Amino acid sequence: MSESSGLPAVVDRFLRYVRIDTASDRDSTSFPSTEKQKDLSRLLAEELRALGLEDAEMDEYGYVYATLPSTLPEADAASTPTLALFAHVDTSQDEPGGPVVPLIHENYDGSVFELPGRLPAGGAVTLDPERSPALREHVGHDLISSDGTTLLGSDDKAGCAVIMQTVEDLLADPSVPRPPIRVCFTVDEEIGKGVDKLDLERLAADVAYTIDGSGTGTLSYETFNAAEAVIEVTGVNVHAGYAKDVMANAVTILARILDRLPADETPETTEDREGYYCPIEMSGTISSARSKMILRDFTTAGLAARKQLVESLVADACRAHPRASIDLQMSDQYKNMKEYIEAKDRRAVTFAFAAADEMGIELESELVRGGTDGSRLSEMGLPTPNVFDGGYDYHSRFEWNTVQNLEASLAYVQNLVRYWAEHGRDPV
């Protein structure tokens, strides 16, 4: 328990961390995309040093690195994989990131209730089991939410709190076996750039986990393959009264391209392993128009087919509108981590299930209809599944977690660490 608040220490940490506005910015050209992310990174580095991790530091990009030495005999530690624990400090820009006013609703009774904050347009946010069925599974829990005017920030300050509390607890009890552990907090995960500047040699880990999954009792090791497409149309603008056979309306051309995307392959119409096309930005005038979209598919071949369709739509538009200039830029964002994990060290998955079995947890494999830092890390050669942190309804004012879920994530992560210490020398 935290002596200052009477709350479990991991909850006390979480409440402190969410108050720091760390929203990233997908339109920024700097790294990290917002300097305010470093406010939390700096605090985490200071707290790690205060706990005794003398090498803890924040680098120029806002990444935090630290080492928790093994308690195993020297020879055993040398032959045990070094385990890295990751969480990201940034939050989504889709809703206001601060000032967050975290609230605890004790002994939730399953009813609908209104959060006290007033929205700019009037009214308030209501937590309703009809909208969020998972609330029904948390009757009796102590719910944590914002006041409704901002997101909460469980994604991923819950992971930050769990990792920091794990470090403190393990240091307090050296009798618990632990492998060599590297702690790392990243930036800009929410905009797909979380490991762009990460130094894997400096990290020096063999296997890792991101503590960034929603709900409880879930492990994610299969994500979308992801790409981004940017279409820019340069048109020809003349007086509308004399436009016949002269004007090339960039807005109209771009709208027609987007309208030809499959209507039943959008985020709103797909689920499970179904991929999609999703325009996320559109702006322009007759002279020029621009749209950014994201493409998602669980298979490599499926993503390639989606990219090919966008290319063909743009090519068709070029032929249909010769007076306009249309440019398409596509870039890959991250890959499905599953094939990389299985090729490198599947124990990242099997040990996670085994550690849960020991605790009586029926760990479920959950597809990620998105990506995590673990997607890129696994592709880069560091197998990194994603572990639950207890939160729900990420990226929204409806976001919530519970005291009990944070404690469950903490207990599981600590047991997972111990399991690697005891079985890490087993054959791959």
Image (tube, rainbow, N blue to C red):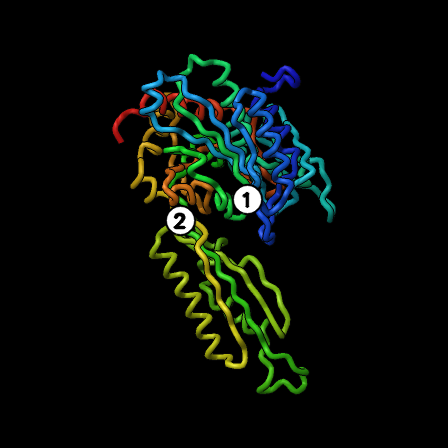
Quadrant of the rendering where the N terminus is positioned: top right
Q: Who's the residue at 38% across and 28% down the image? A: 82
Amino acid, disc 2: Lys
Contact? badges 1 and 2 (CB < 8 Å)? no
Q: Who's the residue at 33% across and 25% down the image? A: 80
Q: Who's the residue at 66% across and 17% down the image? A: 4
According to the picture, the residue beneath numbered tag 2 turns out to be 335
Is residue 215 among the parts visible in the rendering?
no
Q: Residues within 10 Å of mark 1 (few under 14, many from 20)?
A: many
In this rendering, the answer to whether 316 lies above or below 220 is below
> In the image, is 78 to the left or to the right of 209?
left
Query: Residue 125: x, y in percent?
Result: 66, 41
> In the image, is 342 to the left or to the right of 143?
left
- Looking at marks 1 and 2 on the same chain, the residue that comes earlier in the sequence is marked by 1
Quadrant of the rendering where the C terminus is positioned: top left
Image depth: mark 1 or mark 2 in front: 1
Q: Nearer the viewer, residue 202 or 82?
A: 202
- The residue tagged with tag 2: helix, strand or loop? loop
Query: Residue 76: x, y in percent?
Result: 32, 20
> In the image, is 418 to the left or to the right of 166?
left
Quarter location, residue 10? top right
Quarter location, residue 132? top right
Query: Residue 426: x, y in percent?
Result: 27, 25
Query: Residue 104: x, y in percent?
Result: 64, 27
According to the picture, the residue beneath numbered tag 1 turns out to be 188
Q: Nearer the viewer, residue 211 or 202?
A: 202
- The residue tagged with tag 1: helix, strand or loop? loop
In this rendering, the answer to whether 259 lies above or below 271 is below
For residue 347, the mark is: none
Amino acid, disc 1: Asp
